[in-house]
Amino acid sequence: MSTHRSRAVARGLALVLAVAGVPAFASDAPVRSSALDYTDPAARHHPVTCKEGDREREPGRSLGDVFGEQWPEQPLPLPGGETRKAHVRAVQFSRDIVRGAPAQRGLVVVAVLVDPAGKPLAARPICATTDGYDSKARRLALRSFYEPALVNGQAVTSVAMLIVPFAGGAR
């Protein structure tokens, strides 16, 4: 079979799989909390899920449980309505945040509740690769700047995920 024909067959097979809705590589892995879209009201009830091997800080709880009444119910997204996840605009880093940190590298995933003006209301570490950085990551999250989530073109209170890597303690 020619190279041209082989490529055509491969493209055709990929198209058939895509149209049929069959994923080329199926996965039974749970969806990590950091990958969810919290403009979808169902996501607030999804249990916190971390990467395998990471330390879960809120095992068995959802972010709806974690933030409680601070996170009001959101309207359902309408078809064609403008929707955008809350996200970090700028991280306000300073050396005092890492002062006294452990010597090993680490990574912390922080769930940040962001109000309609983009102000962080609360921050909770939900996953970490190691211990010792949670309070530092939380402080960094509360000092940072965010774009609020939009549902149907209106800014709403929602969750942004901030992934904070640490290179080791600064002295």
Image: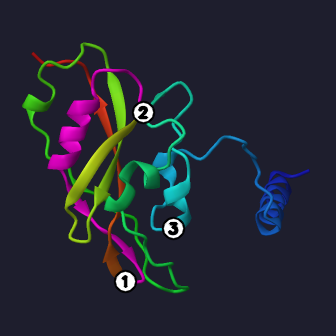
Residue shown at 43% from the left, 70% from the top: 73
Foreground pick, 62 / 134: 62
Residue 20 drawn in magenta: no
Mark 2 crowdedness (10 Å alpha carbons): few <14, some 14-19, many ≥20: some
Question: Which label number is shown at residue 105?
Answer: none
**The magenta stretch spans which residues?**
127-152
The CA distance from mark 3 to mark 2 is 23 Å
Is 112 left, or right, of 7 in this rendering? left
| Sequence order check, earlier mark of 3 and 2 | 3
Q: Amino acid at mark 1?
A: Gly
Q: Which residue is mark 3?
A: 40
Query: Which of the 4 quarters of the picture holds residue 14?
Result: bottom right
Is 153 left, or right, of 52 in this rendering? left
Is 167 left, or right, of 35 in this rendering? left
Is 62 left, or right, of 91 in this rendering? right
Q: Which residue is mark 2?
A: 57
Residue 70 screen position, x and y as percent:
31, 60
Question: Which label number is shown at residue 153?
Answer: 1
Q: Amino acid at mark 3?
A: Asp
Residue 98 screen position, x and y as percent:
16, 26
Which mark is in front, 3 or 1? Answer: 3
Foreground pick, 48 / 137: 48
Residue shown at 54% from the left, 39% from the top: 60
Which mark is in front, 3 or 2? Answer: 2
| Sequence order check, earlier mark of 3 and 1 | 3
| Sequence order check, earlier mark of 1 and 2 | 2
Foreground pick, 144 / 132: 132
Q: Secondary structure at mark 3?
A: loop
Q: Secondary structure at mark 2?
A: loop
Q: Residue furthest front?
A: 69
